[in-house]
Amino acid sequence: MRLARIHSGIPSRMQPPDLVPYFARIGGDPLRDAFATRRAAMPWRGGRSLAEDDIPAFWNTLLQNASSVPQYPLHVENPRGRALYLHVPFCANHCLFCGFYRNAYTADQAERYVDLLVAEIEGEAEKPAVRSRPITAVYLGGGTPSALSATDLSRLLTTVRHRLPLAPDCEITIEGRIIHFDPEKIDACLDAGANRISIGVQSFDTAVRTRQGRRATKSQVIRFLENIRRRDRAALVVDLIFGLPGQTGEIWREDLRICDALDPDGVDLYGINIIPGTPLHKAMEGGKFPAAPTLTDLGEMYRAGSDFLTSHGWRQISNSHWGRSARERNRYNLMIKAGAECLAYGSGAGGLLGRASYAVDGNLAAYMAGMSDGQKPIGSMRIGDDLQPARDYIAAGLETGMLDIAGLSVPGTPDAGKVLAPLLSQWQAAGILTMTGDTARLTTAGRFWYGNLVNAFNDILVKITGAPPSAFPMHRPSPAYQSNSGRLS
Ligand SMILES: C[S@@+](CC[C@H](N)C(=O)[O-])C[C@H]1O[C@@H](n2cnc3c(N)ncnc32)[C@H](O)[C@@H]1O
Ligand code: SF4
């Protein structure tokens, strides 16, 4: 099954890449067994890291200049739009499955943190780089933003809206969980301009929830969501996880059924990622929980979720996200996948300004000390290379399930589409995608194996251009632990 070597478009010093290692298995059920392992969809960023000592001066120069972003034709979301991410690194407790947990919530520390976050925003609000383009999506994520007090939520969102150049149709999302998100806080967010509330439900089943450290019962979760829905002032999004310990196929179908009946505007379906070092991973290692679900189990649950939503009037917006009402745009997540600029505030937040991707120090004490001294503590920064628009184009296309290969432009490789064509044909034969002309459309199986597809493209681009492989966390801190299987996002 060797491929014909296609020389067109390959720089003369390079050998054409061997595509065979990226082939999918033909003949079985592609959702169950197209690949032997599921690769994580890592943030995908090349370029070079800046030395720590060079970061402050570079950052100050960046802020003094209006940013100009390379234009690239993307069909998913206007890449000229700009996002804003604010990170709240506190949680009431560490849910067993979660790799995002950083700090226990205390009222005093959180209030002081919001003081510094507000100062961070105000300190940059008038800089040319910040003023140069409208912000079209804001995401207040965590950790647990809804752990903050109503007063802190209100002043944070009000600062963002009053001090920064938000577009009139800006999507403003607040992420939260049910426990401690009382009606006063919900109204404080809505009054301050939040127009999208994303709630981590994970599962409605009380036993499955309790085992993972989720404190609200099924009926409390339902009442909470009905309450937000009744207000009808913002898009409501529900996060569900499949493959949690004890979550049988029957419980998963019931999770989907309850979610559908509550009629939120958007829903995320995430396959469980057993992250080494998390309490869940340790409990599984110690035999306190059954072993992790197999890839086949996860594939079947993804198929059940996708089929259920499609047959109940939902439209798939990305590999893990579905929307039903016209209210739901999922703009922030699509923009991030498409490589849009993103201003970042708060300990652990990751951003992108021009070609520079950066992460604010994820160590809370270091963040607080830096901000108290009046210097934003940027922990790391990377300057993107010329290949980045091509990476963004591929990741954004695959994320939305459609990739027009004729539109791919790879510096130094004029015919990259031709190089990749045999791989796309093989994936078509394996049931991973269908081709209409130059456009590939992922099947449900292709969407499940998204991480494998993105990584294959990444490896091949690196091989044909000679660019060094690299990855850098974006938009929110990567889990504190190393992932080995990848979330479906
Ligand atoms: C960063 S978390 C914040 C959510 C919020 N603090 C909460 O507790 O609901 C965002 C979402 O990531 C998903 N998530 C977190 N850990 C995960 C894991 N190990 N595997 C799959 N999804 C996960 C959950 O669905 C969660 O709602
Ligand atoms: S799921 Fe949410 S509340 Fe639980 S540890 Fe993760 S970020 Fe914190």
Image: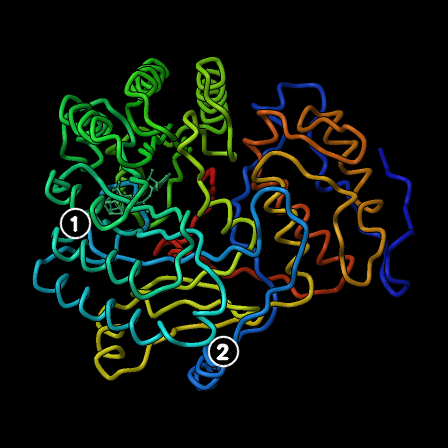
Q: How far apart are marks 1 and 2 (CA)?
A: 33 Å
Q: Which of marks 1 and 2 is in front?
A: 2
Mark 1 is on which residue type? Ala
Above or below 117: residue 83:
above
Residue 458 place in picture, x, y as percent = 66, 52
Q: Earlier in the sequence, mark 1 or mark 2?
A: 2
Label 2 Cα crowd, 10 Å radius (few <14 / some 14-19 / many 20+): some
Above or below 471: residue 241:
above
Q: In which quarter of the image is residue 11?
A: bottom right
The outermost residue toward the left is 108
Q: Residue 147 has which mark? A: 1
Specify whether 446 is left or right of 258.
right
Q: Name the residue under label 2.
A: 62
Mark 2 is on which residue type? Leu
Label 1 Cα crowd, 10 Å radius (few <14 / some 14-19 / many 20+): many
Q: 338 or 69: which is nearer to us?
A: 69
Above or below 177: residue 428:
above
Whether the residue carrying mark 1 lies under 8 Å from ligand 2 is answered with: yes
Residue 70 place in picture, x, y as percent = 64, 63
Residue 277 place in picture, x, y as percent = 32, 50
